[in-house]
Image: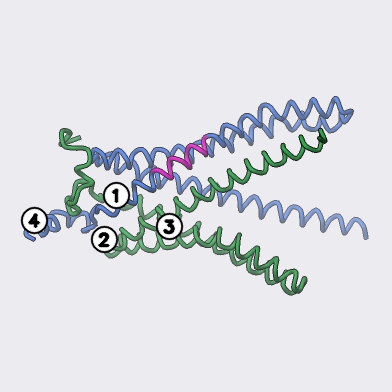
Chain colours: A green, B blue
Amino acid sequence: MEDIDQPLDASLGSKPSEPRLRFTESVRSDLLETAKWALFFAVLMFIVLGLLAFASLALIVTAGAYGFGMAIVMMGIYGSLIFFPAWYYYKFSTLTRQALNFDDNNALEMGFWYLKRFYKFVGILIIVVISLYLLILIGSLLFVSSSRFPN
Amino acid sequence: MEILDNQFTENTNEGGLQVTRNMKVNWLSTSKWAMFLAVLGFIYAGFTIIVAFAMMPMMTTMMTLGGQTELAMLMESFGSLVIGLTVLAAAVTFFINLFQLRFSSNIQRSMQFDDQNAFEAAWRNLRLHFRLYGILIIVGIVLYVIAIIAIGGMAATGLEGLE
């Protein structure tokens, strides 16, 4: 804990090249393993996406026009919900490993940007899901109370 | 320019990767979302524990009152196993989110106080978070595969018995 009497936002100021925090060997190895796991998760999500595409193709073949609509809804909603986090993890992983291998600072910046995008996406998704649950809960409570006591 | 060059030469043992302002902005945002997700995870783990210890006896009682004593006895005999597994799941959830929370608080502290130790602890905790999550997912996939094989095997023996 050196330089404790400097302003708190000193590190956030306009001196980007001041190497206070350093990417030491331990940080680099932590980042490398994190990036590898992120690639693993991304690949798993892409596999799920492929299964989803296969299922919607089967829907189109078996159920015709109705299946086509279902498939579009399924791929549109679930597909994008899976695709974006998978893509963000994939980019985070590849960019971070590229940065560590070739000492590419720009790639590292972009990698962290994608990590942020992932967290933001998942966070907003969870907020939306929780609010949907609450809405359904309130709606069903209203429905039950109105059908229990007509007028 | 000279100052910049000096810093680059100083940093050769760290491979020239440097913390930039953009990174810090992104880390700040990431850490806030990570904190939010971690708190939600803790709540989820708490709910899991409550469900394990409150719902199981309740369901057993309801089944006994409903006259399904055999089902209730089955529940009771499996009860400790189910509670044990649920507590294990809650513990894993707790640790996954503890690592995430520690990542969040450490990266924030490292940026506020230029604390290299907190910086290293943050990435160590993010790594542990990812590792535990990955192991959990691998275990889940393996259990799914085993379940599919077991169900397939049972179905096959069932068909043989019919013939």
Kindly identify the residue that appears in the image at 37 percent across and 48 percent down: B29
Q: Are marks 3 and 4 on the same chain?
A: no
Given the image, what chain letter belongs to the residue carrying mark 1?
B
Residue that carries the numbered disc 3 in the rendered image: A36
Choose top left, top right, bottom left or bottom right for residue B1. bottom left
Q: Earlier in the sequence, mark 3 or mark 2?
A: 3
Residue linked to disc 2: A105
Image quarter hosting the C terminus of chain B? bottom right
Q: Is residue A80 magenta?
A: no
Magenta residues span: B32-42
Judged from the image, the secondary structure of the residue bearing numbered disc 2 is helix
Front residue of this view, candidates A31 and A126 = A126
Coordinates of residue B74 in the picture (x, y in percent): 80, 32
Q: Marks 2 and 3: in contact by CB < 8 Å?
A: no
Residue denoted by label 4: B3
Residue most toward the left? B2
Disc 3 and disc 1: Cα gap in Å? 22 Å
Q: Determine whether the residue tagged by mark 4 lies in a helix, strand or loop.
A: helix
Q: Nearer the viewer, mark 3 or mark 1?
A: 1
Q: Nearer the viewer, residue B94 or B105?
A: B105
Q: Which residue is denoted by mark 1 in the rendering?
A: B24
Marks 3 and 4 close (CB-CB < 8 Å): no
